[in-house]
Amino acid sequence: MEDYLPISMLNQLEYCERRFYLMHVLGEMEVNAHVLEGTLRHEQAHTAGASREGETLTHRRVYVWSDELMVAGYADVVEETPDEHGQTILLPIEYKKGRMGKWLNDHIQLCAQALCLVERTGAAIPKGYIFYFGSRRREEVVFTPELRARTAASIRRAHELARAERIPPPLENYNKCRDCSLEPACLPRETRQLTRQAEIRMREAR
Ligand code: SF4
C-alpha cells in the first residue's frame, strides 16, 4: 500500500498544503511540546482490542483503508451498535489534544475514516465523534454529503500534490504559521521575501 495516503496526513493538508508536502513528501517532523503531547495522548488511548458494554461493541485502534480513494490509516475507536431496526451502525471516534479548532481538518480526517469503513463494510455511518482532551468534550460530526464531498476532494488534492514534485508556497495567513511546529523548517517569511525579490529581478530584466 505504498501509494496509499496516510489518513492523518489529510489533517496536515487541510491546515496547510505546504505543511502536508513537508511532512508527507519530504519527511520533515518537528517535535515541539504540542506534538509530543498529542503523541502521548494518542498512545494512551490507542491500545488495540475490543470490549462490550450493553449492545455496544467498542473496537480500539482499527486499521481502515479505501482502495477507491487510496487512503489508509487507523481509527482510534469504532463503536458498533444496532439501530432500532437491528441494522448495524458504526461510529468512528477520534481523540485529539486541545480543543476544537477553527479549521475543518479534524472533521475531514474523521470523515475519511468513515468513507473507508463504508467501503469495507457497507454499514451505515451517519456521524462520528471527536473527543478533545482539552475541553473533555465529545463533539458530534455529522457526515453530510458536503463533508463527504469535501473529504474526497481533499484526498484527490493530496494525491495530486504528492505527485507534483513541487513544494507549495507558504501561506499568506501567518496566524497559522505561528502555531505550526514546522515553521523553523518552512521559513515562510524568508521564502516569501526571496520569492518577491526574484519576481522584482525578473520584471527588471525584461
Ligand atoms: S509555517 Fe506556515 S506556511 Fe509553513 S508549513 Fe507551517 S503553516 Fe504552512
Image (cartoon, rainbow, N blue to C red):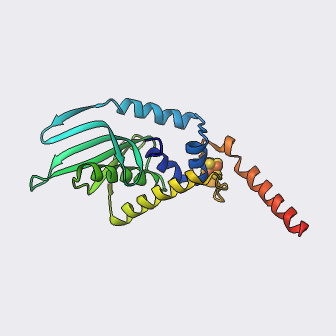
The residue at the point 49 percent across, 46 percent down is: 9
Work out whether residue 164 or residue 149 is closer to the camera in this orientation and state it: 164
Left or right: where 53 falls relative to 8: left
Left or right: where 69 falls relative to 81: right
Residue 79 point in image, percent of width and height: 24, 43
Up-down: is 152 above or below 77?
below
The residue at the point 60 percent across, 45 percent down is: 180
Residue 60 point in image, percent of width and height: 29, 36
Count of number-bearing discs: 0
Q: Residue furthest bottom?
A: 206
The residue at the point 41 percent across, 48 percent down is: 71
**Res. 139 in view:** no
Up-down: is 59 above or below 87?
above
User: Where does the N terminus fall, quadrant-wise?
Assistant: top left
Q: Residue furthest left?
A: 85
Residue 126 point in image, percent of width and height: 26, 57
Work out whether residue 99 or residue 62 is closer to the camera in this orientation and state it: 62
Q: Residue furthest right?
A: 205
Up-down: is 9 above or below 29?
below
Q: Quadrant of residue 46?
A: top left
Residue 170 point in image, percent of width and height: 66, 54
User: Where does the C terminus fall, quadrant-wise?
Assistant: bottom right
**Res. 33 in view:** yes
The residue at the point 38 percent across, 30 percent down is: 44
